[in-house]
Amino acid sequence: MGKLRLDNETVAARAAQRVAEMTGAAKMPPGGPLPAEELAVLRAWAAGTRPWSFAPISRAAVPAGRNAVDWFIEKSLATRGLRSSAEADRRTLGRRVYLDLIGLPPAPEEMAAFVNDPRPDAYERLVDSLLASPHYGEKFARHWLDLARYADSEGGVQDYGRPFAFRYRDWVIQAFNTDMPFDRFTVAQFAGEPVAVGFHRQTITSREGGVELDRIRFEQLLDRTSTVGTVWLGLTIGCAQCHDHKYDPISQRDFYSLMAFFENADELDLEPPQPAAYRAERDSLVGGYGIEESLQFWEDGMRDALANPGKRPLWDVTYDSYSKRVDHGRRTLLKKREARTAREQDALVDYFAQNSAGAIGKAKFDELKLKELSEKLKKLDERFPRREGVMTLEENGERRPAHVRIRGNWADKGAAVEAATPASLPAMPAGSRDRRALGEWLVSRENPLVARVTVNRLWQELFGRGLVRTSEDFGAQGERPTHPELLDWLAAEFRDTGWSMKRMVRLLVTSATYRQTSDAREDLTAADPLNTLLGRQSRLRLPAELIRDAALRVSGLLNQKIGGESIRPPQPDGVADLQYSMKWEETKGEEKYRRGLYIFLQRTAAYPLLMAFDVPDRTVSCSRRETSNTPLQPLNLMNDPVFVEAARALAARIEKEPEATRVDRAFALCYGRPPAGRERDAVLSHVAKRGWFGASRALLNTDEFVTRE
């Protein structure tokens, strides 16, 4: 009732100050003044209500000539009477850094070259060559696409495909390969080149009848706002949609002020002009059916239904269907004919030719031969397939007002708000309040969160868990960093030296901490069972896509083409039937052997092999994947079509070798090492019973094959 909030820094500090300063009869507590040490505890508690991550980045000194990672890790271990582990052997280290930097195991020849390189900087040279590989961008794009909730379909019940979504994925790969500075990478996705802004087009949509378009758009705005909070700030900002955040200093007003940056953004699909031959043939075809008068009548009726809902129920149904099935259909309908793009007009005419019978009458529909026209238009489109396009956002010319939504209800508008960043974080400079300004504020020197959050995720990618384990939550409910000084040093280094991702990755993987063996030690197991102190490396199960990639790589089947349209490899029968609108037409030829990053990601029926190994569903931003162990996983490794093909190809590859060296070759391909004596005997026994095909299936189904040491 007195508006006392013990989770609010300002209010808590004021309360602590009152206790310290009250005198006379009002002195608190009534029995006498608090001792000085208890007052100090009270003041410290009040100051601690502000999340640690909101404090400015502080850079501790590191002795000259020392790798900062090793300096902080060794210092932390020493305070507990522990020491770092020895460096892993070259074969383990080579396989580790290949998998971590390009997501592929080394070929036997590549491993041999590294193992036998006598130069003292052989490892650093290997790291530099991998950082320069075009496959580096593929490896690190995978994690960013999880954050971006990238998919090749739009979600919802119908879950139609998005034929140009892959262009954003390819832009991300290229950005990582060229080492685009992270500040530029960030701003580009808010207001840079159109394909980069596709980050904000990865939202789910719905085409269900009866769902209001304004509500769909509101839910997409919520998603964009929450995703910005997760990806760049590492905060659960979405918790403030309905009320002030219960744990972090983020008010509901803060949430809707942040959402206001997107209120004025309209979805836009850019396509280059269609070929002149297509345009001429289409115009001639449509003109020959004499539909202009009926089309105008239909458009007028649709606009009337939009303006006067309930006036004519039949037209209401027609308009509702059109507005859901034609992208940006309402906007197209409200434009004058001459203001529409060719693609907008084509989409409207296509819908009219297919679905206008209920509105204009069956007799008129048949008289105009619209069914025939529709079929001819489909065949024309098949002859001139759409291959180019970009999903992006554009600014609306009229500024839309933004409001707090009472209890998060999209239709219940509260106080008006202007575009602004959370009040508890450093203020945005005066000036423009558009998306570009938001992107620039995120990577400004005053904002302490973005650099911390980003280097923490790089650490997570290379060590299995972040210095802050809850990489999605740097707020009060998240975990504190295990090595706060190291995290801040890395954040400062990242920010102050040009935001280079490759530079930070190189710093991490050349550290002695990264190069440690992952072998367990009794002293470490007793003192640090979760290896949070980094006294050794961690064994990590490969991500879903990389397990498939590794099988294709060692079998010789892998198609290493970079970028391009998504593929649909073979999958078990019946899976495609689970989703509503699209059939899974298998990709043929060598294209089906491309990397897992390029598998068509259908939100309502994801590729089963990837699902078995914990790929996220991409409906919301995912900062860290879970790693499960289930019986379904080895069954997939044994029986999934791609693993059966890979085992068959691996067997054929091995059988080309002299019989005496086949086991050695198999181990060099699969594990990057020679076999031990017992392993050799076990493989030969397996070959005697089931041939090299059976042995290859077993080799691809081991823990070692799917694990990074």
Image (spheres, rainbow, N blue to C red):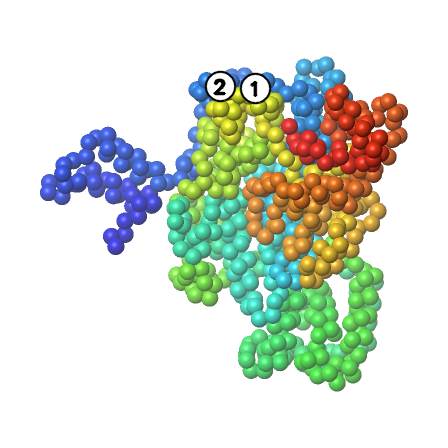
> Which quadrant holds residue 86?
top right
Q: Is residue 586 above or below residue 682?
A: below
Instruction: Farthest residue to the left: give it.
Output: 25
| Residue kind at label 1, given as amino acid type | Ser
Q: Look at mark 1 in the image and give the residue it sits on.
A: 85
Residue labelled with disc 2 = 82
Residue at 44% x, 45% y is 428
Q: Is residue 524 visible?
A: yes
Q: Secondary structure at mark 2?
A: loop
Specify whether 504 is left or right of 293.
Answer: left
Q: What percent of the width, then of the height, locates residue 46?
A: 30, 39
Distance from the alpha carbon under mark 2 to that under mark 1: 10 Å
Q: Secondary structure at mark 1?
A: loop
Q: Quadrant of the C terminus?
A: top right
The image position of residue 154, as x and y in percent, is 64, 57
For disc 1, the neighbor class at 10 Å (few under 14, some 14 to 19, many from 20) is many
Going by the image, does 705 lie left or right of 316?
Answer: right
Q: Nearer the viewer, residue 167 or 612?
A: 612
